[in-house]
Amino acid sequence: MALFFKVLTKMDVERTLSLPDGCLKALPESQVSHGRELQVMDDVGMLWNFRCVIRAGVVPKLNIVSGWTQFVRIKQLCSGDSVLLYRDDDTLTGARYKIEVSRSHEN
């Protein structure tokens, strides 16, 4: 199940990934009230640990604040590239989160 698709902005690749509205409910529950840990697998099977922080406001929003800049650097992402985050539900192992990257440019 796709959680979100986003074309990356300059802010997304330089600092933090701001997740679209509605993602909060789709992510795993956390013991921490102000954030969540999210482990995702990329297209080559590497696991990434992202720390999601809830930004206060009328509508709470999530930002991935740690682990994200390393992911951007390793994947060599640029503004205009896109990411797709989805959840794969398995009856034996439970929910697993995966991330796919699409490039808008040639490296």
Image (cartoon, rainbow, N blue to C red):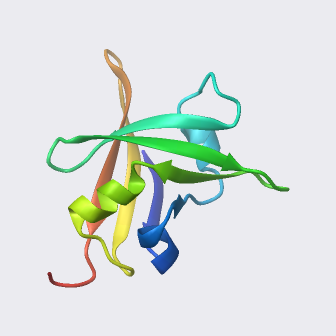
> Is 80 drawn above or below residue 6 in the view shown?
below
Looking at this rendering, what residue extends furthest in the bottom direction? 105
Q: Position of residue 51 (x, y in %)?
A: 50, 42
Quarter of the image for the C terminus: give it: bottom left
Outermost top residue: 92
| Residue drawn where x is 51% and y is 61% of the image | 16
The residue lying at 78 percent from left, 51 percent from top is 56
The x, y position of residue 90, in whole percent, is 33, 25
The answer to which quarter of the image holds residue 29 is: top right
Q: In which quarter of the image is residue 63?
A: bottom right
- Residue shown at the point (25%, 75%) measured from the top left: 103
Is residue 101 at all visible to an observer of this figure? yes
Count every numbered label the image shows and give the total.
0
- Say above or below: 39 vs 105: above
- Foreground residue among 96 and 73: 73
The N terminus - image quarter: top left
Q: Nearer the viewer, residue 29 or 73?
A: 73
